Amino acid sequence: MYDDRSQDRPTQPTDDFYEADREVPETYDDTERHLEPETYDAPVDYDETEVYEAPGHSIPSDEGSQPDELMAQLHSGANWFYWIAALSVVNSVIIACGANWNFVVGLGITQVIDFMAMLVAQDLNPTAAMVLTGIALAISVTIAGMFAGMGYLANRAHTWVFIIGMLVYACDGLLFVLFQEWLSVGFHAFALFGLFAGFKASQQLKTYAVDQQFQLAPEAS
């Protein structure tokens, strides 16, 4: 007898079906990625003409004080230390030789030392007098050498050297006031004016250097 229910049975899977299930899936390659191309913002052009002025500092204009002019003024003021030192040594040599004249710009303290040594040497024998004069000359040259050292540092824009030098030279000028050597007092005042000009130029150069750093600073984000 024919059974019609056999037609309703599901078909059995074939061998090809199982073979397809047993296939190993492809290995995923991590290195193979599809990425969006990176985009970069175009750099913002820096306008070097923009000047950023810090509070309390004024940017020097093209007219007026410039670095070259300030450096020339600085060296001119600092060189007064060399003149004072050199003329002080010349004065000491002149006094040691027995002359009665000297340069008015030299140091007063060295002249006092030299004159005192000369007065004491008059009562000594020639050998002792020569030794005393040599000692006084060495002391005067040492003091003058200190002023030459100040000139070296002042030419390198050390502002504190100008301050110390002016104070010492002003006190030295008081010796001429005590002896009423008014011509020497006047030249001391003139030399102090030159030293002050160098001191002022040194300060302006430092301010200019600070301002230049602000000019070259990148724009704040």
Image: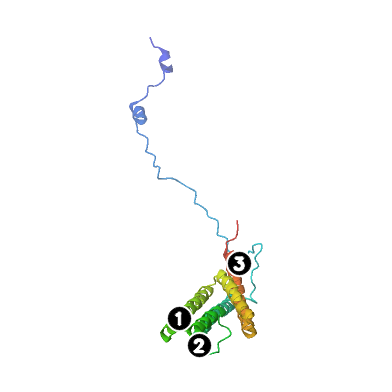
Nearest the viewer among 207 and 141 is 141
Badge 2 marks a residue whose secondary structure is helix
Closest to the camera, between mark 3 and mark 2, is 2
Q: Which residue has dot 3 on it?
A: 211
User: In the rendering, at what x and y percent does residue 122 appear?
Assistant: 49, 86
Residue for point 36% across, 31% down: 20
User: Hey, which quadrant is residue 220 in on the image?
Assistant: bottom right
Asked whether, in this view, residue 19 is left or right of residue 179, the answer is left
Residue for point 46% across, 82% down: 133
User: Hey, which quadrant is residue 55 in on the image?
Assistant: bottom right
Q: Which residue has dot 1 on it?
A: 132
Q: Residue 24, relative to residue 192: is it above or below?
A: above
Q: How crowded is mark 3: few (under 14 residues within 10 Å), some or many (20 or more)?
A: many
Badge 1 marks a residue whose secondary structure is helix
Q: Earlier in the sequence, mark 3 or mark 1?
A: 1
Residue 94 circle label: 2
Q: What residue type is labelled 1?
A: Leu
User: In the rendering, at what x and y percent does residue 37 appear?
Assistant: 49, 51
